[in-house]
Amino acid sequence: MKIAIIGFGAAAIGFIEQMKTHDIEIHVFEKSKDIYSSSISGIRADGKLFVSKEMGGELDVDVHLQKQLVDFWISKTTNKGVETGKSFSDPQYYKAFYSKGFLPIHSDFYHLGTDQLKEVLYNIFEEYTAAKNIHFHFNYEVKTLKIQSNTVIINQEFEFEKVVVSVGRSGHKLIKQIISTNPELVVDDTKVDLGIRFELPNHIVEDLNREMYEFKVKFKSRTGYMVRTFCNNPSGYVVTENYGDFKTVNGHSKLKEKSKNTNFAILTTVQLTEPFNDPIGYGSHIAKLTNLLAGNKVILQTYSHFVDSKRTKNLYRVQPTLNPGNYILGDINLAYPRRVIESIIDFIENLNEVVPGISNADNLVYAPEIKFYSNTLNNEYFSHLKFIGDCSGYTRSIIYATAHGHLMAQEILKQ
Ligand SMILES: Cc1cc2nc3c(=O)[nH]c(=O)nc-3n(C[C@H](O)[C@H](O)[C@H](O)COP(=O)(O)OP(=O)(O)OC[C@H]3O[C@@H](n4cnc5c(N)ncnc54)[C@H](O)[C@@H]3O)c2cc1C
């Protein structure tokens, strides 16, 4: 049998790992120029691997399988160096957050770091290129899929009996093309996470960072929206992420180079109802509006100005780790919906009750920080075309995406 995989990211790797020893010809189509390209795969930044039933996606993935996949990723590093931690294993921390209305999320994590991740990807790629049944087609963007009764045609050029789409969130154009001709595929398309990236000196959160490195909590704010922390980076750096027609903020940390600040995202989940059906459009418009105000950059504001809706003109004690060429001091309130801003402020004020210093006036707020959910797709709809990883809407992390690939390969092998 010949199988095509579109996209070479975490889900594709989970899939290939299961398939590679079988008598199956695997063709990988990847739009990036080569394996060294900075645009390849979502697994290029930070590399925190989580074992948790409570986050990472909507799939039911057994924790033993999750740990097995973590071990797989670690086994591909050159010197097996990882930072590890457990969130909320200490009941004192659990109780402190719980008593102030937070829902603490349990997880074990393993941090590879941005620097090591690159090596991991090269090492896996080297191994796959040595296999006779795995063929890479780089610099090959799949723009159209023609779905016939027994085969799928890629870009009117290659015909396959089975195609697995694993294009992550950056492959949204292809997914849109497929959905436009098969709208019945979509099961859910209503959610987007809007928020900010928060940056403060390490010493305010050092106990938390030492105890669990990544603290994940959810909170039902007084607006009714759920707010959560995401991607905590002790001694980390704030960076911008370029989506082509807009820029957002993100954060990461490295194993070797350390800053004096910690950053994490505070995200509000906005879920709308009919006739709304374009969460990506909604999130993109807010991101573009924020960029528009900042001369095509992101906005940085102090926390007190964020609360008072005043433009920030000067910073005080906390100096940003984001490169000065990437931001403008401004007012995020001019771009963000009031309900989202109120939810974030409510979250921070309550968090300050547990971690004093969180709501200091000169802590830093960056926007736009937006996390898109892909449309959730029905994988039962076609027997010869499947969707795995983040593009399917079922996963949002490296381990869940890898697991989805792993499970899908097992299902196909069973057939
Ligand atoms: C900045 C950043 C940091 C992150 N940090 C973490 C983290 O620390 N821990 C964690 O668990 N998760 C993290 N994530 C999320 C994680 O990267 C994703 O959940 C995971 O990579 C999803 O895997 P995937 O295989 O579905 O997609 P991806 O890994 O994104 O791979 C998709 C691949 O498809 C290719 N592609 C896209 N469209 C096409 C096309 N039309 N034709 C051909 N190829 C195409 C892309 O170039 C890419 O190589 C992060 C994401 C980002 C953006």
Image (cartoon, rainbow, N blue to C red):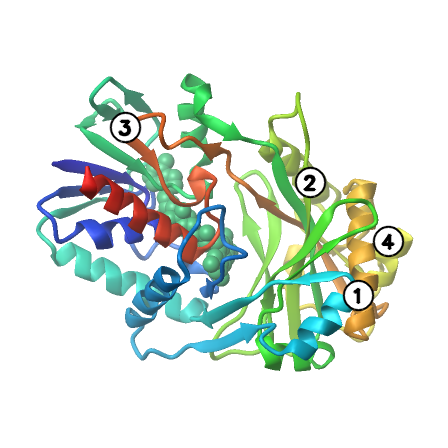
Residue picked out by circle 2: 270
Seen from the viewer's position, the closer of residues 63 and 310 is: 63
| Residue type marked 4 | Arg
Q: How far separated are the C-alphas under marks 3 and 4?
A: 54 Å
Sequence-wise, which precedes: disc 2 or disc 3?
2
Residue picked out by circle 1: 100
Front position among marks 4 and 2: 2
Do the numbered discs 1 and 3 sit on residues whose CB atoms are within 8 Å?
A: no
Residue picked out by circle 3: 383
Secondary structure at badge 4 equals loop
Q: Quadrant of residue 277?
A: top right
Q: How far separated are the C-alphas under marks 1 and 3?
A: 48 Å
Sequence-wise, which precedes: disc 3 or disc 4?
4
Quarter occupied by the C terminus: top left
Q: How far separated are the C-alphas under marks 4 and 2?
A: 25 Å
- What's the residue at 41%, 53% (across, down)? 61
Front position among marks 2 and 3: 3
